[in-house]
Amino acid sequence: MKPGTSIFSAAMLRYVREIRTAMFRGLSGETLACALDGFDRGDLRQAATMWQPMARRDDMISIVKPKREKSVSRREWQVLTVDGSRAAKAQQQVLTEFWNNVRAVNAFDLNQKGGFALLVRQMMESVSFQYANHHLIWKPSRDRLDCTFEYVPLQFFENRTGLLRFCPTGFEMEGQTLAETEWMTTVGDGLMVAGSIGYFCKRNALADFLAFSDKFGMPGLLGRTKHGKDSEGGIAMAEAVEAFGQDWAAVLYGDDGQVKDPIQLIRAEGGSGSLPMPLIIDRVDKRFAALWRGADLSTMSAKDNTGASLQGGETDLIEQDDALTISEKLNEIERIVLEFHFGAAAAATPKAYIRLIVPQSEDLKLLLQVIQALVPLGAPIAVNETLERFGMAQPKEGDALLTAARAAAVPADPAAEADAARLNADAEEEKFLAGAARLLAKAGREDRAELVAEMKAVLNAPDATRLNALADFVAQLPDKIGHDSAQQDAWENLLASALVNGWAHNANES
């Protein structure tokens, strides 16, 4: 693989900056409609040039858009394996090192540099702009492969054929085909299509609101006098009104004199007592919040928390989907890395893959109870998948691990211990008697009584001589059971077990 270079030279970067149009300043309903129609046809430049300043300058989009992007980029990531094979662990090590050393830059703003988190934020631009494109600058060496992901703004691409193509200056009608190993394109929702319409409505409402406030923010003055305009009284009234310094002021001459206050305040209000502009602005802001975050502002502040819980569920769902979209796109890049290190076969069937860890929106308490019930039954539950559902990553090598707390020592209860000992002795006695009955049934009728008597003698022997008595009993067994070696072994094991468990002597004494 050949090393790559930056998509823009320094000279080209200066040229592109100089020829950028001031299209945003001429925003109107007609220019916005033309830009959106062009975007649908594949001419992305005009819409992209408008969307970028809109996203930065609107006070609501500039809040909800970064939150949507950062909610995914701040999540922990981990390279998981499909099995525990040596090949899977080798691939996991290579991919972990690759993503730990990845670099992300902005081709149009070289001050923007970072690592994996910046790469994810740049990919998340696709949520707003529908496409986020990265030029891949590979840096291969003898034993490793590194990559710099260079983000290129959308205005430098066209989509007229249904496949994005790169336009070096942004003004080409037909761009250059994107090589799969040199470009990464992330596809998202393209929320700025609807967001730009809302921005236009909100901007006009704000402009009208500001104009109204500038003109009618301070009440006007109306002087009323029964004197004529050029009379001494009329001139005095005009001078009095003018002394207030108001542009919005007037004098009514020849009044009938019935008005109690000769100088009145004039306020401008809508027919219903309120203005429509704040309602428009508020509605647009709520729609922005719903588009990017999954719920509007009124839902977020619901008094009974029902709306808040719904909003939380929608936000979780959106974040999980975003994380999966980013992870699957990065999996495509991993195939290039695996092919470099392990060959085409490993790239075709990878055994390791990256995942952004986001908790699943489910009842985790219930999930834990299910796992605790299934594991003792031998249910095969994968550790990686379980940790991912809880939003946890596999611990790294050398990490301190949580362990179960040791139970506090409980003082011994002599009575309880005695009861337990008696129960154990009874169980052992029943087990011994059952085994002895089976063996006696196999002995001859005339030998059975003698065997029972000798067995009792062994079990009732003093502790010091019991082992010798057992040895004599076992030595005489061949004569009693017809030289049956299998029965001899069975008797020996049965009596030895009784002696070891220590119940026989005490039980018989009682």
Image: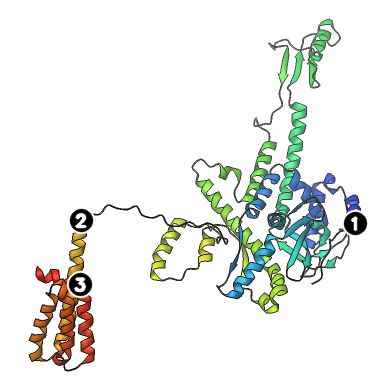
Front-lying residue, 271 or 71 = 71
Report which quarter residue 222 is drawn in.
top right
Front-lying residue, 218 or 234 = 218
Q: How did the renderer colour the structure?
A: rainbow
61 over 152 or under it: above or below: above
168 over 54 or under it: above or below: below
Left or right side of 128 for 237:
right
The mark that comes first in sequence, 1 or 3, is: 1
233 over 448 or under it: above or below: above
Q: Position of residue 392 (x, y in %)?
A: 54, 58
Question: What's the amino acid at mark 3?
Answer: Glu
Determine whether the residue tagged by mark 1 lies in a helix, strand or loop.
helix
Question: What's the amino acid at mark 1?
Answer: Met
Left or right side of 345 for 483:
left
Q: Position of residue 166 (x, y in %)?
A: 83, 63
Q: Which residue is mark 1?
A: 12
As drawn, the label of residue 414 is 2
As drawn, the label of residue 428 is 3
